[in-house]
Image (cartoon, rainbow, N blue to C red):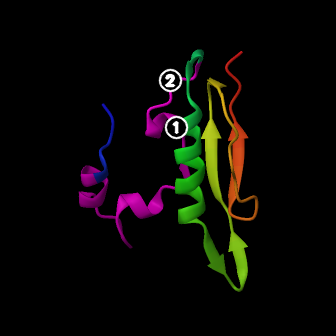
Amino acid sequence: MALTRLASELVRLQQGVLSQAITYVTPEMFDAVGDGIADDTASVQAALDAAAGKAGIVGGITRPFAVIGSGTYRITSQLTMDGAKVRFSSFGTA
């Protein structure tokens, strides 16, 4: 069962809500299939854009936000990523 955005806003922590505690996004959160066959370009780009939007500045230094991939993503066009705001990591599947 996936945790919806609304549900994550309703879960309270000692400080803030659950959605504020999440420190990464995945392409699957943006409907990527990750099977190497389906075109995941738009989903991966959406994850990169979302991560860039969640990056913060701490003490004058940009704190990047993570995109974590765990599939084999078929990319059919150029992706754009702000390397100062986004870090892409991968969990191997094989």
| Quadrant in the picture for residue 45 | top right
* Foreground of the two, 84 or 22: 84
Image side of residue 13 versus residue 86, left or right: left
Task: Name, please, the residue furthest toward the bottom.
Answer: 59
Tag 2, which secondary structure? loop
The residue under the point 60% across, 66% down is 55
Q: Percent position (x, y) of residue 12?
A: 29, 63
Tag 1, which secondary structure? helix
Q: Is residue 83 magenta?
A: no
The residue under the point 62% across, 29% down is 70
Q: CA distance from mark 1 to mark 2?
A: 9 Å
Residue holding disc 1: 43
Q: Where does the magenta region start and end?
A: 6-35
In the depicted structure, whether residue 64 falls above or below residue 81: below
- Which amino acid, by three-letter code, is at mark 1? Ser
- Which amino acid, by three-letter code, is at mark 2? Val
Q: Is residue 9 magenta?
A: yes
Q: Percent position (x, y) of residue 27?
A: 54, 37
In the depicted structure, whether residue 3 falls above or below residue 86: above
Residue holding disc 2: 33
Q: Earlier in the sequence, mark 1 or mark 2?
A: 2
Q: Which mark is residue 76?
A: none
In the depicted structure, whether residue 16 falls above or below residue 42: below
* Foreground of the two, 45 or 19: 45
Total labels: the figure holds 2
Image side of residue 57 versus residue 61, left or right: left
Image side of residue 19 versus residue 80, left or right: left
Task: Tell me the quarter of the image containing the C terminus.
Answer: top right
Q: Percent position (x, y) of residue 62?
A: 70, 73
